[in-house]
Image (cartoon, helix red, strand yellow):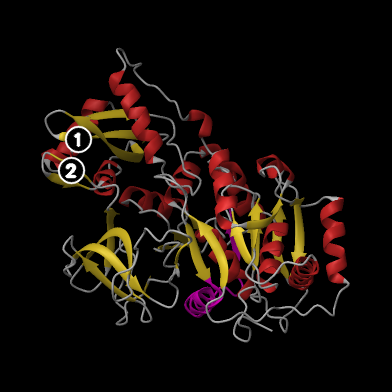
Amino acid sequence: MSIEESLNLGCVIDSAADPERVAFIGLDAAGRATEHRFGDIDDRANAVARALLAQGHAPQERIALLAANSVDYVVSLLGILRAGLVAVPVNFKLPAPLITFVLRDSGAQLVLCDAERRAQVPEGLPALVFGTQAFDAWRAPGALAPHVSVPHVPAPEDLALLLYTSGSTGQPKGVRLSHASHRWVVRTRRAATPLAGERVLVAAPLYHMNALALVLLTMASHTTSVLLPQFNTTAYIGAIDRYHCTWLTAVPPMIAMMLRERSALAAADLSSVRVVRMGSAPISPGLLEQIRSLLPNARIINAYGTTEGGPVVFGPHPLGLPTPPLAVGFPHPQVEVRLADDAGAERDEGVLEIRSPGLMQGYHQRFDLSPFTADGFYITGDVFRRDDEGFYTFVGRRDDMFVSGGENLYPGEIEKVLERHPAVQQASIVALPDEIKGTKPVAFVVPRAGVAAVNEETLKAFSLQHLAAYQHPRRIWFTESLPLAATQKIDRAALVREALRRSSATQAAPIDMPFASDHGKP
C-alpha cells in the first residue's frame, strides 16, 4: 500500500518498494549512527498502531510526542496515524507551563517521549519512554496481534495532526490538519520534487511543519534521510561530509550560523550538496551569495509555507521564466492566492491569502479567532509583493511591521540592506518606544567572520546610503549570535527585551554578547 492507495496519512511507505532500502540513518546526541530499513520502519509502525488499539484508544483520540528527533519518533508518528488517532507533536523547548497547556488543551491521553523529556510530562498523564524495556514490552504485543486491523480508514474530515504554533505572542494555537489535506501535500510535493537517489539531511525539529512534512515526503519517495536529534552547527556540517548528503532543508538562521564555523567548513567536503531548500524565514541577498560560494554545486530554492496552509503554495513559472533570486515563486496551479490591503481590496502588495486542498480546518477550541475570509481563503498575515511576471516576494510579517513617525516599517526590508554590507553576517531589526516617532528601529548585528570589523557609525552611514532616512536603525548593537526560537527563526521578543535593557542601561559595554551561549545550539 502507498500514499496513492491509502486514505491514511500514516501509509506513506510503499510496501511494494524495496523493503531493504535504508530509510533513515539516525544519529543520537553523541553522533552514533544506526541504519533503519523501510521494511523495519513499516513493521514497527504497525506494531505501535496495534499496541495503541489494544490499549483501548478510540479513533481521533490524541497521542502526544514529546522528544528530540529520532527514528522512534517517526515510527510512533506513523503508528498513531495508522491507528486512526491524532498525533500531537509538542515543542519541548516551550516553558513548562506552556507544555502543560498544550498537553491539556489537546486532550492528549498518552505521551510518547524520550528520557530527556520525561520530566516535562505533567503528573498524572501516562507516558512511555522510547528505548526503555517498558516501551518495548508495550509495543511487542501489538506486533503479535494480527487480528487488530491497521491501517484505520479515516473519514474525509478526520484529523491526522494537531500542530501547535510556537506561542511567542501568546498561548500556542492548535492547528487542525486532516489526513486528506496532508496526503494531498505529500502527493503534490512528490510530483514536483523528485527525491529518487537523493540523501536528505533533516535537522529541524519534527514538531515543526518544515521537518515533519519533509520526513513524510522522503518516506513517500523511498529515499534515505540522515536524521539529527537537533540542529547543531558542527554536527550538521559533519553529517554532510560523512554521509555525502545531497539535499538540505533549513531556515536561513541555521545556515548563517553554520557559515561562522570556519574551521569545520574548511575540514569538510560539501561537494555532494545539490539542493538547498530554504524556508520558514526570508533569505537575504548577502546570505544567498555566501551559500552559493560555499556550495557552488547546489541549486538554492527559496520556499514558502505555513503550518496552517501547508508547504505547497508557490512553484516554478508556467512559462519557464527564471525565478528572481529573492522571490518564492509563482502560485502553484492547485493553489489560489491573492494579496489584500487593510480594506480587503486586492493589490500587488498586501497580505497573502491562500486557498488550497492543504489548508487546516481551523484552530483547536479557538472559536474567537477567524483565520479565514468569508469565501474560504486563509489569511496568512505575511505581506508579499507581486511583480509584473507574477512572481511573489516576501516583504515581512504584518505582525512584525511597526509604525515610526507615520511610516510603515518592515524589519525584513531593513535587514536585507544591512546584510549587504561585507562585514555583516546577520541583522535583526526590532522596534523601541520613542517619544517623538512613537517607535524607532534598532538593530542587532552578527559580524561576518574573517573580514574587517565595522563599527556602529560606519554601519549607520551605510544604511543611510541605501535606505530611506526613516528606515535607518537609530542604534546598532553587535553580538556573537542571535537568539533563536524553537522553530529556528529569530526570537524577536527576546531581542526586544535585550534592546530595552541596553537602551535603559546607564553605561553599556562597548560590545556585549548575551546570546553567545546559544551559538550553534538553538
Q: Residue at x 75, y 48 (%)?
A: 32
Point out the tag, 2 or 1, that comes first from the N-terminus. 2
Q: Is residue 37 above or below residue 452?
A: below
Percent coordinates x, y for residue 48 in the rendering: 76, 66
Amino acid found under the numbered disc labelled 2? Val
Find the magenta span and give its range: 178-204
Q: Residues within 10 Å of mark 1 (few under 14, many from 20)?
A: some
Res. 272 image quadrant: bottom right
Percent coordinates x, y for residue 414 in the rendering: 24, 44
Instruction: Judge whether residue 447 is colored magenta.
Output: no
Front in this rendered view, residue 429 or 193: 429
Res. 64 image quadrant: bottom right
**On the picture, is 67 further left or further right than 315?**
right
Percent coordinates x, y for residue 150 in the rendering: 74, 78
Q: Is residue 517 above or below residue 401?
A: above
- Spatial distance from mark 2 to mark 1, Cα to Cα? 7 Å
Front in this rendered view, residue 326 or 406: 406
Circle 2 sits on which residue?
403
Q: Residues within 10 Å of mark 2 (few under 14, many from 20)?
A: some
Q: Residue at x 84, y 80 (%)?
A: 147
Mark 2 touches mark 1? (CB < 8 Å): yes
Q: Residue at x 47, y 60 (%)?
A: 365
Q: Residue at x 11, y 39 (%)?
A: 405
Front in this rendered view, residue 308 or 516: 308
The count of marks equals 2
**On the picture, is 283 further left or further right than 244?**
left
Badge number at residue 439 = 1
Front in this rendered view, residue 375 or 502: 375
Secondary element type, mark 1: strand
Instruction: Judge whether residue 189 is colored magenta.
Output: yes
Q: Is residue 79 above or below residue 436?
A: below
Amino acid found under the numbered disc labelled 1? Thr
